[in-house]
Amino acid sequence: MLQLNKINKSFSQRGIVLDNLDLIINEGDTISIAGPSGSGKTTLLNIIGMLDRPDSGDLIFNGGSILGFNNNEAADYRSRNIGFVFQDHLLLPHLTVRENIVLPLLSRKITGQELSSKLDHSKELMEKIGILSFNDKYPENISGGEAQRVALVRALVNKPSLLLADEPTGSLDKKNAETLCDLLLEMNRLFGISVLVATHSEGLSDRMKMKFRLENGKLLSNLK
Ligand SMILES: Nc1ncnc2c1ncn2[C@@H]1O[C@H](COP(=O)(O)OP(=O)(O)O)[C@@H](O)[C@H]1O
Ligand SMILES: [Mg+2]
């Protein structure tokens, strides 16, 4: 589905962050990327999500190179194919949970049949991820674990084929972290979404099928 070929990325003050990095993500994969702070995990996820561009290398999505996309095409690729979950939920404080969730559906030209099917899907997600009981509340009135589950629903309403989760449990206690991990895997199982998580958490990383460590700009297989 997505192939990274010899990706290089440097930042002027830091030097090489990604060094001829290769990665193949197939449909339905669950992948973890561990590595110390500053090793380049976020940079890698940003490149996959086309939020940032590599200095060289290629990014192939469904058989075609996507690095030549202009910013509009990149935004379209992102909204159609990629869901993001971050360490902080980034919910908008003046919108209710439900409004936060449907917002991504209003931000591009989704109409008619597609819109109603995605609205139905968002209800199914809210039910499966267990947030229906508080979907009229505002973010400040729900817990951190609940907010992160809302962020997960929001990431999935557009039916992405790949979910990128950057330290998704970094702000959660153990119990909520486990719940979120269970849900990531359930979404993978139910909808076939590929899941790529960057995480410090061994508990989370151990539950993914493919485990990597990002070290010196390269991905190493993280066997224990
Ligand atoms: N936009 C940027 N400009 C300059 N340096 C950056 C930028 N983004 C990341 N870096 C540097 O690249 C390195 C990798 O950062 P990052 O990808 O955030 O690592 P991680 O997510 O593994 O903690 C760090 O040294 C960081 O300071
Ligand atoms: Mg990071």
Image: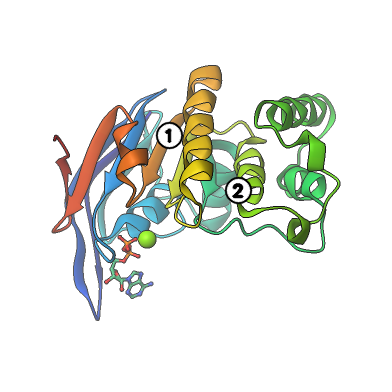
Helix, strand or loop for disc 2? helix
Under mark 2, the amino acid is Gly
Residue located 41% across and 55% down the image: 46
Query: Is residue 141 visible in the rendered structure shown here?
Result: yes
Helix, strand or loop for disc 1? strand
Query: Local crowd at mark 1 within 10 Å, few (<14), some, or many (≥20)?
Result: many
Residue 99, given in percent of the width and then of the height, sits at: 81, 48
Residue located 41% across and 23% down the image: 28
Dot 2 corresponds to which residue?
A: 145
Residue 47, given in percent of the width and then of the height, sits at: 38, 53
Q: In this view, does 175 lie above or below 170?
A: above
* Camera-nearest label, 1 or 2: 2
Q: What scheme was used to colour the molecule?
A: rainbow
Under mark 1, the amino acid is Val
- Identify the image quadrant of the N terminus: top left
Viewer-side residue, 64 vs 118: 118
Of all residues shown, which one is farthest toward the top?
A: 190
Distance between the alpha carbons at the discs numbered 1 and 2: 19 Å
Of all residues shown, which one is farthest toward the bottom?
A: 13
Residue located 81% across and 42% down the image: 135
Residue 56, given in percent of the width and then of the height, sits at: 24, 56
Query: Is residue 161 visible in the rendered structure shown here?
Result: no
Viewer-side residue, 59 vs 136: 136
Give the mark, 1 or 2, whose residue is nearer the N terminus: 2
Dot 1 corresponds to which residue?
A: 195
On the rendering, which quadrant does ligand 2 occupy?
bottom left
Residue located 31% across and 58% down the image: 54
